[in-house]
Amino acid sequence: MATTYRSRVEPVRLDTSSRIVPSNDYYQMNDQQIKARQQMAHVNVVVTQPGRNVWEFEHPWSTTLFSCCTNMKQCCFAFFCPCCFEYQVYKRAGETGCTCLCPAARFALRSKIRTAFRIEGDLCNDCCISTFCPCCTTIQLNRELYYQGL
């Protein structure tokens, strides 16, 4: 059985007290005066402030790439069990655990950390370093996360 519903429509009443009515002298103006009045009401708003470039990198890495052997415990952990060490770094960075299984995940994480903390470098450098020095890269990322308080 189909039921038909009726909606009750009420008439809309306009409140005339809230309307803005132009004064009589507005209607007595010529076209040039009206255009001049409209142009005076135009306001320019500055959206951006000049000066600082948002893409400029401000900071160096907290440790150099080849200072990975200063902490031998961490160095051995990264060299002998790289999967576990990378998993720990990805978790600290807020990534999922399966991310470390992807082939270019280390490169992506290095780029993410570098841009997030405005560290100097570029994508080509990130790619080469994460491909040819995987243990040193992961240790450097772990130290940078520690340095940044994560």
Image (spheres, rainbow, N blue to C red):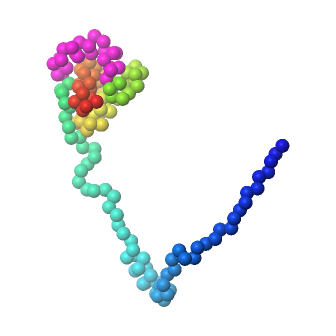
Residue 114 position within the rendered picture, expressed as x and y whole percent measured from the top left: 27, 34
Quarter holding the C terminus is: top left
Q: Name the dominant secondary structure of the magenta segment.
A: helix
Please tell me whether residue 101 belongs to the stretch shown in magenta: no
Span colored in magenta? 66-89
Does residue 49 appear in the picture of this structure? yes
Does residue 124 appear in the picture of this structure? no
Who's the residue at 65% across and 68% down the image?
12
Residue 88 is left or right of residue 67, and the answer is right
Please tell me whether residue 71 belongs to the stretch shown in magenta: yes
Residue 139 position within the rendered picture, expressed as x and y whole percent measured from the top left: 25, 21
Who's the residue at 18% across and 17% down the image?
71
The vertical placement of 131 against 122, above or below, is: above
Residue 79 is left or right of residue 1, and the answer is left
Who's the residue at 39% across and 74% down the image?
41
Res 69 → quadrant:
top left
**Outermost residue toward the top?**
80
Res 55 → quadrant:
top left
Q: Nearer the viewer, residue 51 or 75?
A: 75
The vertical placement of 18 against 140, above or below, is: below
Residue 8 position within the rendered picture, expressed as x and y whole percent measured from the top left: 73, 60
Quarter holding the N terminus is: top right
Who's the residue at 20% across and 37% down the image?
59
Q: Nearer the viewer, residue 33 or 145?
A: 145
Res 67 → quadrant:
top left
Residue 26 position within the rendered picture, expressed as x and y whole percent measured from the top left: 47, 85
Q: Nearer the viewer, residue 119 or 13?
A: 13
